[in-house]
Image: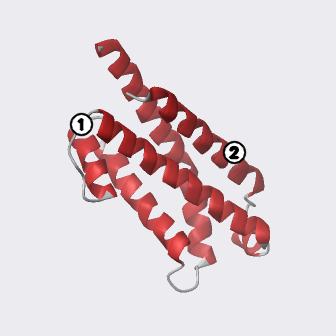
Amino acid sequence: MREDIIRTKIIEIEESIKLVKEHLPENVEEFIALGLVKDGIYKRIEFAIENVLDICAIINTDLELGIPVSDEDIVDNLVRNRILSKKMGRTIKEMKGFRNFLVHRYGKVDEHIAFENIKDGMKDFLKFIEEVKNFLSRYRSEK
């Protein structure tokens, strides 16, 4: 298991979330007025989600859980093998959808929805990190 890479990616997620929290205003009106800072928040969220997906892919590959066709297959493999909870599996799929929305900008971004997703989603990153760290502890003790 490439635990060192996973731990580095966890640190990157934590750093991104810290930066977002430091710059995320209390209300959507202030968020909309942020300009380039808002774009930076979007990029940091995108980067954090990419790290979540990377961690999932590393675990899937290193445990040889199957050859996935998509990120959803990877997440399903981790849930099926009780590495992640079902709820976390659904959350990661939602994160991926939000990331795709930000990356591809399907039309104009609805700043109100984006703000709420970011504000409410901060805790999901921390829950993901907790589940991965718990898995790594179990994995180490089983070796």
Amino acid of disc 2: Lys
Q: How is the image coloured?
A: secondary structure
Quadrant holding the C terminus: top left
Q: Which residue is mark 1?
A: 64
Q: Position of residue 123 (x, y in %)?
A: 54, 46
Q: Position of residue 31 (x, y in %)?
A: 73, 69
Q: Which residue is mark 2?
A: 18
Per the image, label 1 sits on a secondary structure element best described as loop
Q: Position of residue 140 (x, y in %)?
A: 37, 17
Mark 2 surroundings: few (<14), some (14-19) or many (≥20) residues within 10 A: some
Q: Work out whether residue 57 can be spotted.
A: yes
Q: CA distance from mark 2 to mark 1?
A: 33 Å
Specify whether 66 is left or right of 2.
left
Amino acid of disc 1: Glu
Quadrant holding the N terminus: top left
Please name which of the two marks, 2 or 1, marks the residue nearer to the observer.
1
